[in-house]
Structures are given as structure tokens and as C-alpha cells.
Amino acid sequence: MCGIIGYTGILDAKKVLTEGLQELEYRGYDSAGIAYFMDNTIKTIKQEGKVSCLCESVKETAAEDVTTCGIGHTRWATHGGVSTTNSHPHTFGKVTLIHNGIIENYKSLEEELQQKGMEPVSQTDSEIAAMVINDCYEGNPVKAIKAAVAKLEGAYAFCIMFEDFPGVIYAIRAGSPLVATHTEKGTIIASDMVALLKYSKNYFVLPEHHIARLTVDDITITNMEHQVVEPKMLHVNWDVASARKGGYDYFMLKEIHEQPEALKNTIGPRMVNDLPDFSEDHIPDSLFTDINRVIITACGTAMHAGLVGKNMIESLTRIPVTVDIASEFRYQNPILDKHTLIITISQSGETADTLAALRLAKENGSKTLSIVNVKGSSIARESDYVLYTHAGPEIAVASTKAYTVQLAAMYLFAFRFAYAKGLLSEEDTKKYMRKLENTIQTVEELLSYDEEVKPIGKKLKKTKDLFFIGRGLDYALASEGSIKLKEISYIHSEVYAAGELKHGTISLITDNVPVIALATQANVYAKMISNIREVRSRGAKVILITNADAHVDASLCDYHIMLPEMDDAFTPFGAAIILQYIAYYAAVSRGLNVDQPRNLAKSVTVE
Ligand code: F6R
């Protein structure tokens, strides 16, 4: 949600900022802007639309400006519509800032400021923050920031420039992420590591409620008591190419193709002598013997990975697992105790609701483990234990590779859990591990199914409504297929447990309504076939996905995709690729921007 970047150094700051915003654009893309020091003044350029529109504006209006210090922002609108006025940076008095987050009490602050005779020009909460900081400013930026944030409620990451301090950027965060690095060419701070990769692979996460002061030579961090704090340096082994499209039309397609590698990197280091091994993750077996209940909580695709994980954990350990949407879990007064393990799953590690659910679990004395892709992110840092997925940077808004590695992490967890509790013998655990490892090869094979799926995508070009049906694991997976299709192709779809359809929804199945039926599970295969016949006889166009050994009567469906030979418990890894391709090719056939779907943004740091 909103990408922010600040740079001060010896390079062309406009170039650093606009290039950085292009890397961060997946976080929000309805408007963008930069502000920079020109001698002792601050100049601002803002533009509604994509970062490329801002780049044009910068070329047209400021080609001659030479600057080495500035801040930049790409917006995902929350308060105030999409307009140039509402885009960042916002300036009030001596203060120019960019903001990611939401200031919840901005209305009451606005009223206070109005009583003092000050009027904002935009409808944003961010401008109010600039006004509050300016109101607190008497020549000392740190004092002003400290006094201002004491008045703010909500989540924020700010980069702030004070007109009186050319070449200096101040930053502070609460909730929203900020990472920074120091290089020979200056200092740089951003919402996400992908904007820093070009300059360094070493970085640190700005601790919450600490103020960073960036100059050409150094970054100083002080806490609220004005003590200097040394940040903990982190390292990523992502390279710049991993955050580029690399010849693919879209990041999403590239990321679909990166799944075998991502799975290898996630499973490989945890497979020791063919057994699941969490020693490098510092997860002791005592964790498994201490718990009698698991709650998985997450949002969107990550939550769908939890639904698949539940199935495997329960079937191997017979320990009850519930899966909750994080934004619901938080408010339903959940029953938590020290024998409950809360697993939070998150690609970004910054999703506000997931983070809040984790905090709630900790407050109530539960143990916490997170499955996270971004190293050093808030959810990872605040969990008792972390199982990092190694998908590399995921740029497309629609999650693909992060999902399959989340599945892998869930399976590894289930295997170790059952093994540690003595419920799975060494031999059987090894068998499961080998099957998990084999999914890498199968996923690789499935990447070449694009030619088979493309015609399905084309067929969906004019579709308005569609249904996904499945049972058991297939139902869990269908939830993911449905969100993927909706978010990038804008086709309305609903997912139904196949047996439930006839309890109401089948009234919507009429001639030519597409139904994507997942029937990969032998134990419910016959029941699925009956359900498919039910929709077929009402005119549905059926796209059927089965496991390799299914005998499918040609009259049953219009398209049949048969997965390569896979154990039933592992078919989500394979079928996920088909569902990702269906969504991708449907969106492409409708001429949509697959990587930047409307109204969405990656990393949802607002509640
Ligand atoms: C869908 C998608 C979202 C995210 C959700 C959680 O393709 O990407 O549904 O899965 O916003 O995000 P993370 O995993 O970063 O917590």
C-alpha cells in the first residue's frame, strides 16, 4: 500500500527516486510524486496516473534541475480520491512529506488545526500529518517529529524534509514498513527492499517509533529518548534481475515460472537425510509436543494456503486446526491459551490485519509461528518462530510463487509435527518428504501446460460469472483459483464445496455458465462426478481438472486438464499452476494489465 522512497547522496536524485518508484509501483499506482531540494527550496512534481506519467512530467518540467536529495511516493488511495492534489508529497509550511499508512484521528486533528486558522488543500490524512508536524516545528526537526507523532493515531511510515535542512531526510514509522541502507553514493530509505537492491543487498529495518536522519554520509537512528540506536543489519541474496521482468510480458508470468526454483529453495535446506529439519530455523521439537491446537490466520491467498495446510496437519497429527481470516479473528474474542499455536502466513510480512492477529495471540499467551517471505518484516520479527519461504521478491499483485511455497512450508510443518510427536515413522516421514520434493519436478512439467490452458483463457474473454467447485483439498484450492481469477480478470466468480451447490446456488447455473471443477481427490471423485453431472445437465460449460489416473467421460466436460501423476495429497501444488494460468490467460485475453489490477495493491498495510 503506497510505495515510498527517500534518497540523499551524490547521484541524480530525480533518477534514483523515479527508478525506485518504478520498482515500488506494485504497492500502489493511482498517482505518484517527488519532492527535492533545489538549493534551499523544495520543489514538488506530482501526477495522477502511473509512475510513467510522473516520469514524463519530470522530463518536461524539471529536466534541467540538478538535485541530490529528495523523496518520492506512489499512491494507493485511502483518504481522498485519486487526483494530483491528493497525491504525495504534501507540503505545509516548512514541512514536505510522504506517507504510507492511515492517520485514524485525522479529522479531529484537522479541526484543531482549522481552529488555529490552517486549512488543508487536499482531502488526505497525510496532509494533516504534514500540518501537525509543521505546527510542532520550532527549528528542531527531531523535536517536531516527536511532538507530532505523539498526537497521531494509526499507522504510518513518513519520509520528511524540512526546508531549513537541505540535503537531510528524516523518517519515522509505526506499523508501516521502512528499510534503509547506506552506500558509498549516499543513503536511501524505502518501503521495500526491492527499491534498494540496485544499491545494496545489506539493509536494516527502521525500528518502530525511532527517528532516522539521513545525510549524504550517514544514517543516524535515535529513539524517543534521543539515544542513538545501532540498527540490526540484514542481508538478502536476491539479485536485481529477480525484481525485473526478464523478458516476460508480465511479472505474474515470470513468477509463475519461478515456482520450481522457489520450491527448491524453500524445501531443499529443510530436507536433511530425507527428513524435515528445522534446526536452521531454530524451531525446537518441544514446540510440537507443547501444543494441542493450531489456529492459522492470514489474509487472501495466504489464508488459502492455510486451508490446504489445515488438511495436511489434521490428517497427520489429528490435532484440531482452524483457519481464520485475520481481519475477523482479531474481533471475535478468540479462545487462546499457551497450548495453542497461532500460525500466521504472509508473503510481505506486513499485512496489517495479520500482524494485529499475531499481536493478539501473543498478548493472550499463545505460541506464535509465522510463515513469511520477506526477511526482517514485522510479522517475522514479532513471531516466536519463523519459517521463511524463499520465493524471492514477488512483484505482481496476484500472488503465485508465494502461494506454492507457503503450501510447501505448511507441508514441512505438518511432517515435522507428526514426526516429532511420534505419529509418523521415520520411514513414512521420508516418503512424504520425497513426495514433496517430487512436486518441484511436477510443477516444472506443468509450466509447459500453458498451450493447453490458453484456449480456456480465451474462451473466458466475455464471461461475466463463473463458478469453481471442489471437495476437500480441491475446495481449499478452488478458493485460491477463484480469487486469482477475480483479481486480475475482473470476472465475477464464486467458489462452492461441490456438494453444497444444490442447496441454493445451483439456481444460477444456466446455459453456458462456466464451471471450473476440481476433481483430483480419489476419495470424493465419484461424488464430484455426480456434482459435475448436475451442473452439466443444467447447461454449464465445464472445465475439469483431474489427477492423472481419472477416467473421464468426454460428455462430462468441455475442457479436461489432466495433471501429471501425483499423490492426491500433493495435487494442490500441480493444480495451482493450472489455476494461475487460467486467471492469467483470461486477463490477457481481456486486454488487462495483469500486474496492476484496478483498486488493488500489494502489501496491505491498512486495516
Ligand atoms: C492475492 C493476494 C492477496 C494476498 C493478501 C495477503 O493474489 O496476493 O490476497 O495474499 O493480501 O498478503 P500477504 O501474504 O503479504 O500477507
Image (cartoon, rainbow, N blue to C red):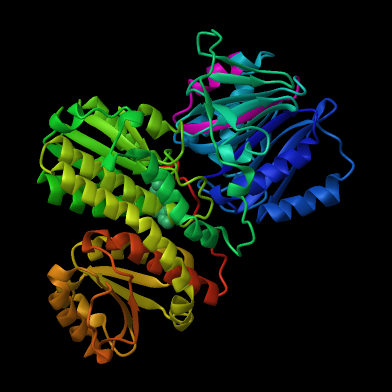
Q: Position of residue 299 (x, y in %)?
A: 34, 48
Is residue 444 in view from this perspective? yes
Is 256 on the left-hand or right-hand side of 180? left
Q: Does the magenta segment cover residue 4?
A: no
Q: Position of residue 604 (x, y in %)?
A: 45, 45
Is 439 on the left-hand or right-hand side of 583? left
Q: Is residue 234 above or below residue 403?
A: above
Q: Does the magenta segment cover residue 146?
A: yes
Q: Nearer the viewer, residue 87 or 366?
A: 366
Q: Is residue 281 above or below residue 194?
A: above
Q: Is residue 601 above or below residue 448?
A: above
Q: Is residue 355 above or below residue 95?
A: below
* Residue visible at 24% across and 27% down in the picture: 284
Q: Residue furthest right?
A: 64
Q: Position of residue 560 (x, y in %)?
A: 33, 81
Using the rendered view, name the quadrant where residue 390 is placed. top left
Is 490 on the left-hand or right-hand side of 504? right
* Residue visible at 23% across and 46% down in the picture: 430
Which quadrant is home to the C terminus? top left
* Residue visible at 31% across and 29% down in the picture: 279
Q: Position of residue 540 (x, y in %)?
A: 29, 86
> Which contiguous range is marked in magenta?
143-164
* Residue visible at 42% across and 48% down in the picture: 264
Q: Nearer the viewer, residue 78 or 310?
A: 310
Is 409 on the left-hand or right-hand side of 84? left
Is residue 117 in view from this perspective? no
| Number of numbered discs | 0
